[in-house]
Image (tube, coloured by chain):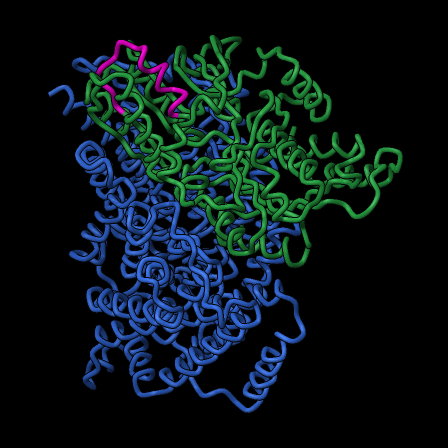
Chain colours: A green, B blue
Amino acid sequence: MTLSRRSLLATTGAALAAPALAQAAGAPIRIGEINSYTAVPAFTLPYRNGWTLAVEQINAKGGVLGRRLEVLSRDDAGKPQDAVRAAGELLDAAKVDLLAGGFLSNVGLALSDYALHRKRLYVAGEPLTDALVWQKGNRYCFRLRPSTYMLAAMLAPEAAKLPAKRWVTVAPNYEYGTSMVKWFEMLLKQHRPDVQFVASQWPQFDHIDAPATVAALAAAKPEAIFNVTFGADLTSFVREGNSRGLFAGRSVVSVLTGEPEYLLPLGAEAPKGWIVTGYPVQSLTDPANAAFASAYRARFHEEPKMGSVVGYALIASIVAGIAKAGTTATEALCDALPGTSFPTPFGTTLWRAIDHQSTLGNYVGRTALQDGHGVMVDWHYVNGADALPSDAFVRKLRPA
Amino acid sequence: MSVFLNELLTGLAGASTLFLVAAGLTVIFGVTRVINFAHGSLFMLGAYIGWSVLTRLPPGPIWFVLGVLATAACVGAIGAAVEMTLLRRIYRAPVLLQLLATYGVVLIVRNLAQVAWGPEDLALPRPKWLSASLAIGHSEFPRFELILIALAPALLGLLWLLLTRTRWGTLVRAATCDREMVAALGVGHRWLFTSVFALGAALAGLGGALALPQGTASLHLDMQVVTDAFVVVVMGGMGSLPGAYVAALLIGVLRTFGIVLLPGLTLVFVFLLMALVLLVRPQGLLGRLEADSPALAGAVPLRASGPALRAAAVALLAGALAAPWLLGPFPLAVLSEGLIALLFALSLGVLIGPGGIISFGHAAWFGIGAYAAAIAATALHLPMAAGLALGFVLAGVLALGFGALVGRLGGISLAMLTLAFAEIVWATAMQSPLLGGDNGLLGVWPDAWAASARGFYLLTLALAVAGTLALRRVLLSPFGFALRAARDSPMRAAAIGLDAARLRAAAFGLAGAGAGLAGALSAYSKGSVFPDMASVDRSIDALLMVLLGGIHTLSGPAFGALLYTGLYDLLLNATEWWRLILGLAIVVLVLAMPQGLAGLWRREGRAA
């Protein structure tokens, strides 16, 4: 069950037709949102549900600054150039107050650079690359999700507890994969100088030759495996690895695999005992998440996914900034956001002043099999603030 | 030893998978001479339909076999339907037009599959017998892959028997040689062709269903599979089934060992291999060298435009000059984008039209131009004019060099070499830290004098007009006519001393420079460059623009570029059905106007 355009229009229409709900007066506050809806639907459709829910809840409470909140959404088809064109259209023709969104790292970077050029605010939701807030960070760009560095820093302490010394890595052959492996190797070696990385595989994204990759990894006779593949590549990798006994007697540490988006398609072949980052939605009982999850289920009749959390928290983070600034003027917003805290399903989160990264964290746990599908068990929450490096480290990377 | 054996078996299984993907494509081409771009889509349908069928059946091996066969039959029927409604009407049209029509089918199928099966990847639950493995030496080897290893040669044998030992096969081979003669002897070759297309589609469906135990049914399968299939088919020799199997073996085994030794080369390994083979044997491993069926049938010579068209062009230009004072910044940015597309499409039009060269990799030059401009702006801190000039010159020089290397070839092997080169450019951009990898290069903004939407639009307009006039001048010069002579009558051209290879190299240089300038402009208009500027998708976009417009005039690609960017812009955000609508538009345009928008795939020319 996914949200169709028609039902989205219907709900927007209903909101417009219900003046009791929309007490907000004056022109609406407009967020121009851009994402890869047709290119990466598995993540972006739950994400769209997430922000739709947030917008509805906020407008039901009277909006922000007494004004209704409105999101104008555009598809970038997974291409940075299309995203930049959409951003131009949103700013110049649709007159939005700020830009938000993005899934792919390069789309996020293109939008961030465009925002800097135009001196307008851009709040990135999903793009994971470190460059967005560090090497290419700028005044106008903020990023919500934990970066590749932070994800590696969440996993490295767990990996260090394993007895394994011979490691191999497998990661998609683009920036996300290479930087994930780079940070994981660096951080694990800090904890455990005795580990060795004996082989690495770099399959083409979305085009993994799983049998050959698995055979090559097995040939290196590792004690532990660090996996960065996800989506269709992950499914092929896990199946082939299961058939060839690659995971038997070996520890596996795997990024993102605990997210329902990637864990559920594995079905009954979901691996057991992998150390992963993810979102154990069914077993979370804390009030913030429970309230979010029950509202989400009531609205969309399905379980929230990681994307839903990102979409929901993205709106919350923007709204908190606007409320603090008391205006939607760009410069005032860019001054107000750093240091602002906002509620998310993962608890209260903060926009850092030093690099415009949020402290949204992630759950780290182990995979297990329940009722024929994968779940996360033995999890704990790692606050994003605890997975970030020292301020000196950040200052060295980020231009002033 | 056990590791070696394991790798070898893995490679053989990979080869079988590749053969399953390619067999249908080569069968269809061998008989109908249609390059079926939708082959990957049929494979994808096989995976999805297979998933729907197999998840409803009991998990035993017998049911699995029956389910896979039923899926193949289903996809075969879909293939027959496509042939009867679309391809049958355009067998006599130029190769490129068939390519365009089947690309329309790709878009339609992708959209329909997303509606029918949803956006999430679908994995087939594997019963024990499918996930089981055998111990080989110290390691485990999946039993299913052993079955695959045996399956490909068995299928090859069956197809060979079918084509050589049955009456149907005899008729099919006869029709391949001479359609008219077979028809004159009272055989309805239409149904023959339909049945061949259905067979090829069924093979694609079979491959898709058999890929399920190892992977998932996903919406990206179509383009992934079709490139793999093209590589195998061209490397083996178009239309040759044994050739396809040999090529699949070569790729499968070498790739498996290559991944161990050179894990960083996964992006280009297969393309490098193909380029090597084609440079040595342009007809493919087991292909026969035959006179290339020209990309398009001979057309009347290019003439200078008549007064009506000229008046129209002047009026259009006047409108374009007035635009900055009538429109806001966003429409102007869209118009600038259209003009960049126009330049890009015109440059490809030079290769395809007068040059008679199909290029699947024109985005290579666009990407090189864009990166050259980005480096000039960000690393060398040069002014924009220098960045544009660098993009223009660098892409031109590299294209000239590439043309000199491959100018002696023609037809589909040259087309695949352009694809391979574009993939290498793309992979270099992806992997080189100097070029920013996947994260691209940022901060490529125009100088102050062209920073406003109005200023940049006027600059783009000036360069597009200058480019158009320059190309027109060149194509109406003796060089342009010599190029066309070498395309239409290679023998006579050679007899009067024209060097076709050198002419083609020059055409590459000209087209590359034009595309490079477009790429450089695009870099400044977007402020950043990324590897996907050199991606296959962008090459296909360019082909679509040129083919939509029609290729025998200069105005054709220009119209096509404006139409395509307009359609794409309009549809992308207006509807989630944009692929379906764009695909249907393409199919309808092809059926209604096989001559392209500019109306000049001259029918009388073909008869000559």
In percent of width and height, residue B267 lies at 29, 43
Magenta residues span A152-168
Quarter of the image with the N terminus of chain B in it? top left
Q: Which sits in the foreground, B446 or B363?
A: B446
Q: Which residue lies furthest to the bottom in this view?
A: B307
The one of A375 and A146 positioned closer to us in this rendering:
A146
Residue A255's spot in the image, x, y percent?
Answer: 41, 24
B272 lies left or right of B65: left
Question: How far across and down, in percent of the image, does residue B302 sit?
Answer: 42, 83
Q: Residue furthest right?
A: A20
Number of callouts: 0
Write down the quadrant of residue B501 in the picture.
Answer: bottom left
In this rendering, the answer to whether A293 lies above or below A354 is: above
Taking the image as drawn, is residue B594 in sight?
no
Side of A59 relative to A343 (left or right)? right
Name the residue nearer the viewer: B198 or B217.
B217
Residue at 26 percent across and 9 percent down: it is A163
| Residue A197 in view | yes
Question: Which quarter of the figure has residue A326?
Answer: top right
| Image vertical order of residue B336 relative to residue A45, above or below | below
B347 vs A50, left or right, is left
Is A359 colored magenta in this rendering? no
Viewport quadrant of the C terminus of chain B:
bottom left
